[in-house]
Image (cartoon, rainbow, N blue to C red):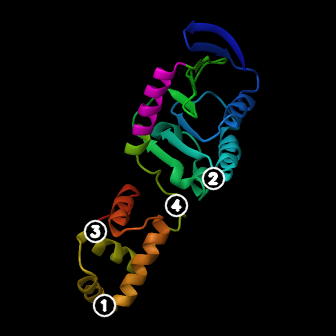
């Protein structure tokens, strides 16, 4: 990737190389502490899925903070199973219903934006202006925080909850006490609490309130 020309102070147009996959890898290699990767309508990058698994996972292995934001249209257009089955990536991924410009924000010091999903040689811009980067970072992180977790794969262990565990989930949603819920489900309070602890582990949460929030986002609170 080479600089092409300055568009405005702190904004430079980039010329992608023939190896866009390699260009993105080089960008991610510059991350020192955190990165936000927002992808809505990506360029034609056949190995993007491999890139996501390799470069992103490598960053996480070194303790970098990552947020991965995808548009629903992007995920619907691709085989998302390998991405969603990667437990290490799960907590970092959010899916937004709205579209946005493809954006990489690196350490709040630089941002790369690109568009032109159907173009043969789509353009990119590098932003170095601190005020603009701050605005981009705020927008991206707020969008990530308000977005939902991705839908589950059909064979996810959460989808395959047995009927008893699903019943426990619904009693939690109704706000029943442990004693009332256990009596209604014809089990001991101790067994009921064991099911609750199992749900916390599966949903990667630490409170009962969070169980309800995450279960709703994942579509697990279906009518009985």
Q: Position of residue 138 (x, y in %)?
A: 42, 33
Q: Residue at x 69, y 43 (%)?
A: 55
Q: Residue at x 60, y 56 (%)?
A: 88
The answer to whether residue 68 is above or below residue 118 is below
Is residue 133 magenta-colored? yes
Q: Are circles 3 and 4 on residues that touch, CB within 8 Å? A: no
Tell me which corner region of the image, top left, top right, bottom left or bottom right, holds residue 166.
bottom left
- Which residue corresponds to mark 2? 82
What is the span of residues highlighted in magenta in the rendered image?
129-142
- Which residue corresponds to mark 3? 173
Q: Residues within 10 Å of mark 1 (few under 14, many from 20)?
A: few
- Of the image marks 2 and 3, the number of the one nearer the N terminus: 2
Residues at marks 4 and 1, CA–CA distance in whole angstroms: 30 Å
Q: Position of residue 154 (x, y in %)?
A: 52, 60
Q: Position of residue 152 (x, y in %)?
A: 49, 57
* Nearer to the camera, 183 or 132: 132
Q: Are circles 1 and 3 on residues that touch, CB within 8 Å? A: no
- Of the image marks 2 and 1, the number of the one nearer the N terminus: 2
């Amino acid at each position: 990737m080479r600089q092409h020309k300055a568009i405005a102070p702190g904004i430079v147009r980039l010329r992608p190389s023939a190896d866009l996959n390699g260009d993105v890898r080089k960008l991610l290699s510059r991350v020192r502490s955190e990165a936000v990767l927002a992808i809505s309508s990506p360029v034609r990058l056949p190995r993007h899925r491999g890139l996501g698994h390799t470069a992103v996972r490598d960053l996480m292995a070194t303790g970098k903070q990552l947020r991965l934001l995808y548009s629903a249209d992007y995920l619907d257009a691709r085989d998302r199973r390998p991405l969603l089955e990667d437990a290490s990536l799960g907590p970092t991924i959010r899916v937004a219903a709205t579209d946005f410009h493809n954006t990489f924000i690196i350490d709040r010091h630089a941002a790369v934006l690109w568009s032109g999903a159907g173009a043969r040689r789509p353009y990119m811009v590098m932003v170095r202006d601190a005020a603009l980067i701050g605005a981009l970072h705020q927008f991206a992180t707020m969008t990530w925080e308000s977005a939902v977790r991705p839908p589950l794969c059909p064979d996810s262990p959460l989808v395959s909850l047995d009927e008893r565990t699903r019943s426990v989930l619904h009693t939690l949603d109704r706000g029943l006490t442990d004693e009332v819920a256990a009596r209604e489900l014809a089990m001991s309070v101790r067994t009921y609490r064991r099911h609750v602890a199992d749900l916390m582990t599966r949903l990667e949460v630490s409170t009962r309130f969070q169980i309800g929030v995450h279960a709703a986002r994942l579509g697990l609170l279906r009518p009985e």
